[in-house]
Image (tube, rainbow, N blue to C red):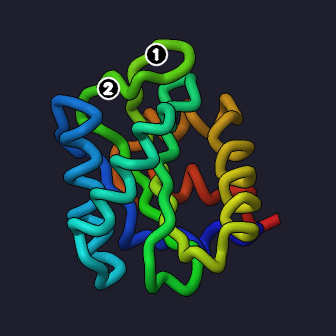
Amino acid sequence: MNLPNIIRPEHTFIGVSAPTKWRALQGIADKAAKAFSADGQTILKALEEREKLGSTGIGNGIAIPHAAIDGMTSPRGLLLRFAQPLDFEAIDDIPTDIAFVLLFGENNRGEYLNVLSAIARRLQSDGTLAAMRKAKTVDEFYSDFIADSRV
């Protein structure tokens, strides 16, 4: 899985402020709307509806909010590190500080599962997470995530 095709350096953010998961989703929707020339309210509604089905907080301080968006032709993502960890209702109750957001079209459901799997495997690596949490710049943060994901 070539993750740099899904998430690009310009879609990576650190120091994102959000007091709650729901406010974080609003900020994510705004960033995604600008990045992907899509409607922010449509993105927000889709992310909120998905989150109501069950938390996308997968544990270890990681969340992977994801949703199908009409009109998207291929999976696209954002990578974020929050300024302060927040309660994402993760399965292990550890506050979330890193989120990978995945948006995909209805026709890409099969492909998005492969992307989710690749992201989850990459983010579960202790070395990757430690480096991402120590990164001082967006470039370092992105590079720490993408390293070894081209294989």
- Residue 62 picture location, percent across and down: 51, 33
**Type of amino acid at the residue the image marks with label 2:** Pro
CA separation in Å, label 2 and label 1: 9 Å
Residue 52 sits in which quadrant? Answer: top left
SS category of the residue bearing label 1: loop
Q: Residue at x 27, y 60 (%)?
A: 29
- Residue 92 picture location, percent across and down: 55, 14
Q: Which residue is mark 1?
A: 94
Q: Is residue 147 left or right of residue 133?
A: right
Q: Quadrant of the C terminus?
A: bottom right
Give the residue at the far right of this rendering. Answer: 151
- Residue 97 picture location, percent across and down: 39, 32
Q: Is residue 137 left or right of residue 31?
A: right
Q: Which mark is residue 57?
A: none
Q: Residue at x 21, y 53 (%)?
A: 27
- Looking at the image, is 68 positioned above or below residue 119? below
Q: Which residue is mark 2?
A: 85
Residue 42 sits in which quadrant? Answer: bottom left
Q: Are marks 2 and 1 in contact (CB under 8 Å)?
A: yes
Name the one closer to the observer, 128 or 106: 106
Q: Is residue 73 left or right of residue 95?
A: right
Q: Quadrant of the N terminus?
A: bottom right
